[in-house]
Amino acid sequence: QTVVTQEPSFSVSPGGTVTLTCGLSSGSVSTSYYPSWYQQTPGQAPRTLIYGTKIRSSGVPDRFSGSILGNKAALTITGAQTDDESDYYCVLYMGSGLWVFGGGTKLTVL
Amino acid sequence: EVQLVESGGGLVQPGGSLRLSCAASGFTFSIHAMNWVRQAPGKGLEWVSYIGNSDTTISYADSVKGRFTISRDNAKNSLYLQMNSLTDEDTAVYYCAGGRAPYNWFDPWGQGTLVTVSS
């Protein structure tokens, strides 16, 4: 059973920088897993932020960036704004038409 | 405007069945793969099922395999999810989401439809 790991919660000050990570219970995340990131506020559908590890979706501000850091995928928010307070989910493609979402990170901006 | 609109959710008893629909507009539905993703109340997102653009490729999460069936009608720009043998663990908001290539990502997303399994 593959488990995708994310920090349950994170806090950042307005204007600060935060890096959320997306790992595997066993093994390392690489670009071959095509990590993508989604933002969700309560009661709303997810919004695509990053796909293919580091490609920003249309309309996403450039303060959001994706990368591989060590053995994990990472989402970095540079210059966090209060509007960025949301849940963030990563998903990894496992091959054979199978995907696994991480448990999500609840980001607080204060 | 690109839009996905889910319907068919509601209250169903354990062991019952339900069929969800997702109507697509604003993009060429027939060339896109599609997915169902669900979210139990207060929980995270869970990928449920994938169907290729011509429904020759289909996959399911282990949690629904053998109980759920994904299908599509490209002539009607519609995606479906037939859900059988429902349990309370299937209670969730069900989202349809486009399957994008390359890079295997999800976009666009519908607003979701709530399925509640309860007696």
Image (cartoon, rainbow, N blue to C red):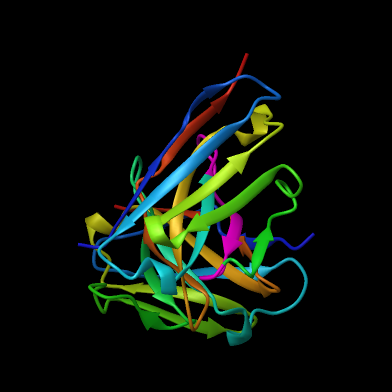
Q: Residue at x 45, y 34 (%)?
A: B8
Q: Residue at x 51, y 32 (%)?
A: B115
Residue B90 shown left or right of residue A96 in the figure: left
Q: Nearer the viewer, residue B11 or A80?
A: B11
Q: Residue at x 28, y 66 (%)?
A: A80
Q: In the image, residue A57 lies at what x, y percent? A: 32, 75
Q: Nearer the viewer, residue A74 or B117?
A: B117
Q: Nearer the viewer, residue A16 or B24?
A: B24
Work out whether residue A101 can be spotted. no
Q: In the image, residue B29 lies at what x, y percent? A: 38, 66
Split into 4 quadrants, where in the image is the C terminus of chain B? top right
Would you identify the image quadrant in which residue B43 lies?
Answer: top right
Please, which residue is most extreme toward the top here?
Answer: B119
Residue B3 shown left or right of residue B64 in the figure: left
Magenta stretch containing residue B52, yes or no?
A: yes
Q: In the image, residue B68 lies at what x, y percent? A: 66, 45
Would you identify the image quadrant in which residue A51 lies?
Answer: bottom left
Magenta stretch containing residue A9, yes or no?
A: no
Residue B110 shown left or right of residue A8 in the figure: left
Residue A55 shown left or right of residue A60 in the figure: right
Q: Nearer the viewer, residue A56 or A109?
A: A56
Q: Is residue A82 above or below residue B8?
A: below
Magenta-tinted stretch = B39-54
